[in-house]
Image: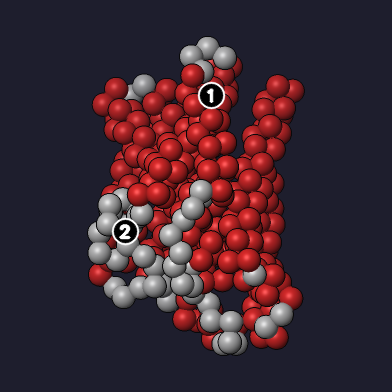
Amino acid sequence: MYRSWWKILSVVLLVYTFTAGLLLKVPHLPALEETIRNLYFHVCMWFAMMILFTVSVINGIKYLRTFNIRYDIISRQYATTGIVLGLLGYATGAIWMSYTWADPNNPAFQSFGALAREPKLIGTAVALLIYFAYLVLRDSIADMDKRARISAVYNIFAYAMLFPSIWIVPRLLPSLHPGQEGNPAMNFKDVDSSMRVVFYPAVIGWTLLGVWITTIKIRIGLLKEKKWQ
Amino acid sequence: MKKSAKIFFLLLTGILSIGRLAAQGGETSGGLDQTMRSSGRIYVVVAVMLTILAGLIIYLIRLDRKITRLEKE
């Protein structure tokens, strides 16, 4: 457990998130009620995903500058963990919206039809599918250097596509999802200060957990790499 | 790759079945839907937390198996 202070920090922050996140007072809003606490879980998944994808693209660029295969492994593993967190964000969002946006008096099919038109849902689905394609592209190229180069370039495109699909387009269209005007959860006006006390540590905690998982995967990748040489 | 696809579909069907159950509850306004909406809808938060936990655990089990396979080689 060399240089593991940040792992401990991650655990401490997550324990704090789960206890303070459930126990502290939150502003009471109609329709949301206690589900507002999902801010510490659902929203943090997306924040962590975005941070991990950023690290991934930085390492992709580093690979293109140095052609050191190490950066390629790092870039790939950060992207996969980002995808996992994105899927979790999607799944938790699906549960959350079933009990807040969906109208219980409507037939299920009808209310699903209304929800499936959410631009944010479509946008994130597009972004995640682009990242799935990144993994498929990688695994379909046998030559190691070629694979690393092509996937690093594709990674940059995939990262660039994140911005229109999850940051810009959903803001231009009418949506039920909050954060229409400005950055959701980052805006000081729309997140109550009592929630920010938990929210920011939660973001850091979840991100560090994602980094922890990724470092384990990177270590495996490097070991595999060493074995093959 | 096959295993991961299996796990992915398992997760997907799980999510879909939760949604379908909720929808069925919505039609009769009872069952799971009523439970989820009681106590200020705190059960929605519980479901979200459990989803994240389950997702991370499934992911870790996959990683664990991958390392085991690598060790055997």
Q: Are marks 1 and 2 on the same chain?
A: yes
Cα separation, mark 1 vs mark 2, equals: 31 Å
Colour option used: secondary structure
- Which mark is in front, 1 or 2? 2
Residue under the image location 43 percent in, 38 percent down:
A201
The reply to whether residue A128 is in sight is: yes
Tell me the residue that label 1 is attached to.
Answer: A8
Residue under the image location 48 percent in, 72 percent down:
A31
* Number of numbered labels in the structure image: 2
Q: Is residue A142 above or below residue A41?
A: above
Subunit that carries the residue with mark 2 = A
Q: Within 10 angstroms of label 2, few (less than 14), some, or many (20 or more) residues? A: few
Q: What kind of residue is marked 2?
A: Asp
Give the x, y percent position of residue A2: 53, 12
The reply to whether residue A46 is in sight is: no
What label does residue A190 carry, if any?
Answer: 2
Q: Is residue A118 above or below residue B53?
A: below
Between A195 and A133, the residue placed more toward the observer is A195
Residue under the image location 71 percent in, 34 percent down:
B65
Subunit that carries the residue with mark 1 = A
Whichever of labels 1 and 2 marks the residue nearer the N terminus, that label is 1
